[in-house]
Every structure is written in C-alpha cells, then in structure tokens.
Amino acid sequence: MLELAALCVLGSLAFSALGLLVASRAQTIEAVSGLMNTVMMPMWIVSGVFFSAQRFPGALQPAIRALPLTALIDALRAHMLQGAGLAQVAPQLGVLGCGWWFASRWR
C-alpha cells in the first residue's frame, strides 16, 4: 500500500511540474489550455492509456518509453496487477523522477 502511494505521489509531482512548466510559458489562460492540449493529447494517444503502446512502430518506441505518462501507467500496472515492487519498476521511477527534476528546474 505504501509503495502504491509512493508511485502516485511521484506521478503527481511529475505532472504538476509539467503543468507548471507549460503554464509558465503562456500569457493567457487560453494559451495555457492550448499548450496543455498540445503536450497531453499525443501523450494520451501513444502512452498506452487507451491503446497498446506496442502497436506503434518500433522507431517510436524509445520516445514512447520516455514519456512520463507511459512510465506511470507501466509502473502502476506492474505494481497493481503483477505485484511488482519499487525495485522492479525502477526504470519507470527513473523516467518520472527525471521528468519531475527537468520540468521543475526549467521553468
């Protein structure tokens, strides 16, 4: 249960930092909305939330694996469905941590 909470908190931090990064670049609320759609819509499509990420071409797989939503989805699925611990989802945690660190430092 504590591991699941840690995954959720790290995912929340990563997406909060991403939201702050995008919001800090715009001057109006409408621009923030448009930029968030530009960032999030492709992530929703290719990350495995609605469709399997493995169905996309092999050339796109490294980019898909680097997305924070893909990392969060894979880590949550592995933990909840297969009982994986934090050590088994370390690559996904690394992607989320790097995304949080990068986005929080770049704004």
Image (spheres, rainbow, N blue to C red):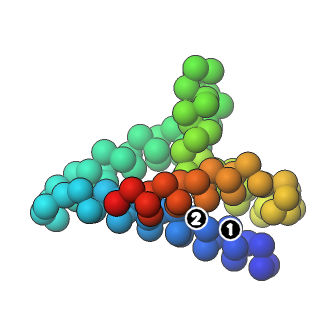
Q: Nearer the viewer, residue 5 or 13?
A: 13
Query: Does residue 46 appear to the left or right of 52 in the view shown?
Result: left
Residue 42 position in % (x across, y down): 41, 40
Locate residue 64: give its quadrant. top right
Mark 1 surroundings: few (<14), some (14-19) or many (≥20) residues within 10 A: many
Under circle 2, the secondary element is helix
Determine whether, in the image, residue 104 is placed left or right of residue 61.
left
Name the residue that disc number 1 marks: 7
Q: On the image, numbered disc 2 is attached to which residue? A: 11
For the point 26% across and 51% down, the residue is 35
Q: Is residue 61 shown above or below 44?
A: above
Task: Say which residue appears at 53% left-offset and 69% top-offset.
Answer: 12
- Coordinates of residue 78 in the picture (x, y in percent): 78, 55
- Indicate left or right for 24 with 62 as reference: left
Which amino acid type is shown beneath numbered disc 2?
A: Gly
Of the pair 102 and 33, the residue shown nearer to us: 102
Q: Residue at x 53, y 60 (%)?
A: 101
